[in-house]
Image (spheres, grey):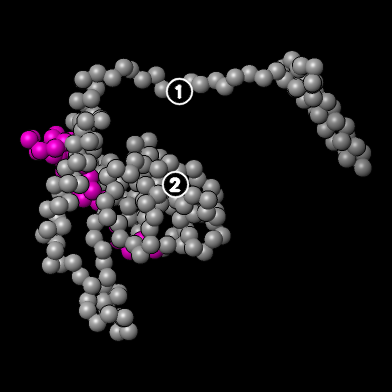
Amino acid sequence: RSRERRLQSETSDLLAEVGQAVAASAPDVGADGLPPLTGPHYFDPLDLPPETAETRDALRDYRMTAAQLDALRHIISIYRGTHNWHNYIPGAAHGDPRCFIRVMDMQTSDPDVRPDGEPGAGMEWIRIKIRARALARFQFRRMVALAVLVVRSNTPRSVVAGSFGVAHFDIPECPARGMIFDLPLYDEYNNEPARPLPEYITFDDEKSVVERFRRSHIHECIYQEEYDEM
C-alpha cells in the first residue's frame, strides 16, 4: 500500500508540473475566454526552382532505371489476387465484405520511348494492364499512385501488402488522363450454357477498326497533352 501511495503522489506531482507547463505556454485569451482567432497559414514545404525549358526537357527525357522497373513489377505482382481494398475505395470500411475484390491479372509493359515525329516524342511510357471483374477507376488510380510513391521514395514494399489490412491508409489518386478501357471480355458469359442470347458476344470482327481509332484519337492525344503540360 505504501508503494501505491508513493506512485499516486508522484503521479499527482507530475500532472501538476504538466498543468503548469501548459498554462505557461497557453496563448492569450480574449474576453470570451477563447484564444484570439488567427487566419490560416499557407506554406509550400518544397522550395521548387522556377520552371525553365531545361527542367521541362529533363522531365521529358526522364528514364526509369532497371531497379525501379523491377520494384514496380514486384508491387504489381502483390496486387494480383483477392484482397481487401477498403483503403482504395472512398468511404469504405475494413469490415465491408464488398471490399474483397479479385484482381485476375495485372501486367507491366517494357518501357516505350515515343519516336521522333510522333506525339509526345522522346518521352518514356510504361503501360500497366489490369483485369478484374469489378474495379472502379479511383481504385486503380490509388493502386498506381501507391506504387509510384513506393518506387520513388524507396519505401519498403511491405507497405503495399499492409494496405490490405485493418489500418487506415490515406492513399492519393494519380491523374486519370492515361486510363483507358482496353478490352471488354465476355468469356464467362459466352461459356454459360443458360445465357439469354444464343450468340456469342465478341468484338473480334471490329478489333482492327477499334485499334486504329483508339491509337489515333485517344493514345496520341494523351501522349501530346502530357508532353505539352509537362
Disc 2 packing (10 Å; few <14; some 14–19; many ≥20): some
Residue 161 is marked as none
Q: Is residue 180 magenta?
A: no
Q: Which residue is mark 1?
A: 45
Q: Is residue 121 magenta?
A: yes
Name the residue located 90 percent from the left edge and 37 percent from the top edge. 5
What segment is highlighted magenta in the picture? 102-128
Residue 159 is marked as 2
**Which label lies toward us, 2 or 1?**
1
In the image, is 85 to the left or to the right of 221?
A: right
* Residue 92 visible in image: yes
- Asked if residue 89 is positioned above or below residue 59 in the image, the reply reads below
* Residue 65 visible in image: no
Q: Residue furthest right?
A: 1
Question: Residue 144: x, y in percent?
Answer: 35, 46
Name the residue located 85 percent from the left edge and 31 percent from the top edge. 12
- Quadrant of the rendered image containing residue 47: top left
Looking at the rendered structure, the secondary structure element under dot 1 is loop
| Pointer 2 with pointer 1, Cβ within 8 A | no
Question: Residue 84: x, y in percent?
Answer: 47, 58
In the image, is 168 to the left or to the right of 209?
A: right
Q: How many marks?
A: 2
Check disc 2 and give the amino acid type. Val
Question: Residue 100: x, y in percent?
Answer: 46, 62
Looking at the rendered structure, the secondary structure element under dot 2 is helix
- Asked if residue 1 is positioned above or below residue 82 in the image, the reply reads above
Name the residue located 76 percent from the left edge and 17 percent from the top edge. 29
Q: Residue furthest bottom?
A: 193
Check disc 1 and give the amino acid type. Pro
Classify the position of the N terminus by image quarter.
Answer: top right
Name the residue located 26 percent from the left edge and 41 percent from the top edge. 67
